[in-house]
């Protein structure tokens, strides 16, 4: 407590200092991330933060970027659901087809290994997979 000019601060001054100090301590930094609608949509479709979502390998991320492939939220949900269905059937390496896009997914690691659209799938031959899911 500071003594100013030989007098004590008033109750109002102390309250003001206390509330300003607590307001600074209780401030929560803004978090960037999903919108409310995106969170709601994920919860309604059974997707969770991290547990059921797919990761993209560096190779797959590069392929998406190089081939100018952008996934919508709906396509991502369908890809995730396709990988989940493949896992339920015991598939380890799955081809998951969503619209005109093909993804090779390592099911145990929940990782998309590569991605391509129909124009890049030469001869439509996919190797080293043990199952396919068409969504």
Image (cartoon, grey):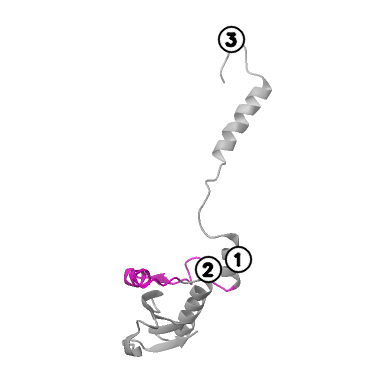
Secondary structure under badge 1? helix
* Residue at position x 60%, y 32% in the image: 20
Q: Which residue is mark 3?
A: 5
Please say whether residue 124 is visible from this viewpoint: yes
Q: CA distance from mark 2 to mark 3?
A: 60 Å
How far apart, in angstroms, are the residues tagged by discs 3 and 1? Answer: 58 Å
Neighbour class for label 3 at 10 Å: few (<14), some, many (≥20)?
few
Callout in the foreground (1, 2):
1
Q: Which element is circle 2 on?
A: loop
Q: In this view of the protein, which residue sits in the foreground, 132 or 61?
A: 61
Q: Name the residue beneath numbered marker 1.
A: 40
Q: Which residue is mark 2?
A: 48
Q: Is residue 46 magenta?
A: yes
- The structure residue drawn at horizontal position 45% and vertical position 86%, both measured from the top left corner, is 133
Q: Give above or below for 112 relative to 25.
A: below
Q: CA distance from mark 1 to mark 2?
A: 11 Å
Disc nearest the viewer among 3 and 1: 1
């Amino acid at each position: 407590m500071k003594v100013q000019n030989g007098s004590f601060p008033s109750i109002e001054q102390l309250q003001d200092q206390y509330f300003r100090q607590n307001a600074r301590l209780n401030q929560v930094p803004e978090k960037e991330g999903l919108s409310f609608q995106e969170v709601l949509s994920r919860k309604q479709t059974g997707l969770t933060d991290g547990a059921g979502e797919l990761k993209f390998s560096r190779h797959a991320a590069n392929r998406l970027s190089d081939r100018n492939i952008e996934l919508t939220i709906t396509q991502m949900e369908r890809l995730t659901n396709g990988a989940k269905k493949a896992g339920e059937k015991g598939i380890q390496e799955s081809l998951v087809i969503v619209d005109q896009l093909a993804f090779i997914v390592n099911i145990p690691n929940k990782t998309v290994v590569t991605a391509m659209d129909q124009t890049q799938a030469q001869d439509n031959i996919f190797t080293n997979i043990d199952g396919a899911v068409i969504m």
